[in-house]
Image: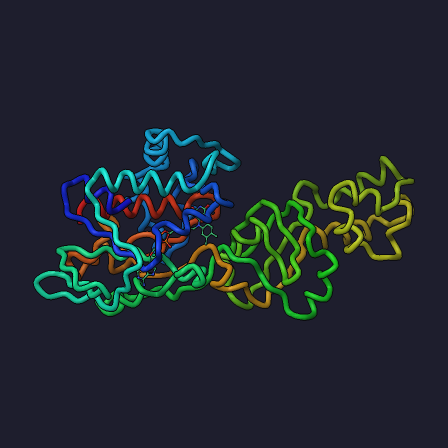
Amino acid sequence: MCAMAAGRRGRRVLVLDHADEVGKKILISGGGRCNFTNLECVPERFLSNNQHFCKSALARYTPRDFLALVEKHRIAWHEKTLGQLFCDGSARQIVGMLLAECAAAGVAIRVGRRISEVRRAARFCVQTDDGDVFAESVVLATGGLSIPKMGATRFSHDVARRFGLALAAPRPGLVPFTFGPADLARTQPLSGVSLEVAAHCAKRAFREAMLFTHRGLSGPAVLQISSYWREGEAVTFDLLPDMDPTFLQARKRVRPKATLRTLLGETMPQRVADFWLPPELAAKPAGDVPDAALAALAGMLKAWAVVPAGTEGFAKAEVTVGGIDTAGLSSQTMMARDVPGLFAIGEAVDVTGWLGGYNFQWAWASGWAAGSVA
Ligand SMILES: Cc1cc2nc3c(=O)[nH]c(=O)nc-3n(C[C@H](O)[C@H](O)[C@H](O)COP(=O)(O)OP(=O)(O)OC[C@H]3O[C@@H](n4cnc5c(N)ncnc54)[C@H](O)[C@@H]3O)c2cc1C
């Protein structure tokens, strides 16, 4: 996106990538259909040490702008849920679109290049295994640390640090939780079960699906809350987000002969209901269970608190929270305040979006901001 914007301005642009093809994360994103943006993209849905930093770039290159590009290339798309836009066909169409735009703008792209150093004298010198490249501007756009198996590196962070920029400590985001042995032994029978929950942590709440896994918890609600979670904190799950805390008492009045197992099984997956039901209550007619016991059961289901042992780490994280500290960058241009000509964009920067197309929109918008001036 940055190369395209700069190329359109008539700049000579060279994209260097160590991978054998560009845009690999686009290719695997959204289950191969690329959730390329989100129509409800507001700054509040991004994490950063400076909540205001992302505002300018996001306002100047919006989801509608990206959508216009998608439509110009006649790529069929659909809104899945919660404003999330996906290709009808394949993520490869998005990479193809960006490559076509770059080609039209005269951008040169070299893949499979190892970059050993970035120095600055009168101009920047980028040392590659294929010789030195000299430039007036260098844009760091090598993403975050997630999925090293796919070629993610700390390159942008390291170069930024060498040029005197600070780092907000990187940690995995949009990542499954892992449990310690005790919680795992308890919840393993539920492995594979998914249900709608509201996940709460650090004054944030996400209402989406949660999945019990053989190592802990996953699913959109868990991935979303994981970006806000810090080690040692408890996460609270409302396993019955549509029910008020007195719903069992209300149902008991209408159907006193129904067993508690039946009543609960009507509101959540039976395996989850069975798991939480005290054995001595499960087969009892609801009418025989005191209101206080029903309230206690509902209370437990509406506030299941668990302290994850950790996360699946960068190996499984969709994004990196943290990165190049925004304090050293201009929010208008993405240029380093103290290093004229050095820019940083995308996931390498300490701006992280929610699940649902926000991270690509940040990549497009910050790339556009830098490409408009570099
Ligand atoms: C499985 C998965 C699914 C995702 N799905 C979505 C989704 O549907 N929607 C969404 O919004 N976000 C999604 N994301 C997040 C999104 O992919 C990233 O936030 C986004 O790609 C960041 O863009 P970027 O250009 O900053 O970095 P990247 O896309 O990571 O690109 C960085 C580039 O730099 C290159 N590079 C890295 N290190 C070096 C080096 N040392 N030298 C040279 N080149 C280097 C890499 O090869 C790569 O081409 C997903 C992430 C993952 C892992």
Residue at position x 29%, y 55% from top? Answer: 111
Residue at position x 30%, y 62% from top? Answer: 156
Quadrant hosting residue 183? bottom right
Look at the image and tell me in which quarter the N terminus lies. top left
Residue 20 shows in this picture: yes
**Left or right for 152, reference 250:** left
Q: By what rule are the colours in the image chosen? A: rainbow
Residue 85 shows in this picture: no
Going by the picture, which residue comes out furthest to the left? 122
Residue 60 position, x and y percent, is 28, 39
Along the viewing direction, whichever of 64 and 283 lies nearer the viewer: 64
Residue at position x 25%, y 60% from top? Answer: 328
Along the viewing direction, whichever of 310 and 276 lies nearer the viewer: 310
Residue 7 position, x and y percent, is 19, 43
**Left or right for 29, reference 111:** right
Residue at position x 21%, y 54% from top? Answer: 335
Along the viewing direction, whichever of 164 and 232 lies nearer the viewer: 164
**Left or right for 319, reference 269:** left
**Left or right for 158, reference 234:** left
Residue 95 position, x and y percent, is 36, 43
Residue 164 position, x and y percent, is 23, 68
Q: Exactly how many numbered labels are in the figure?
A: 0
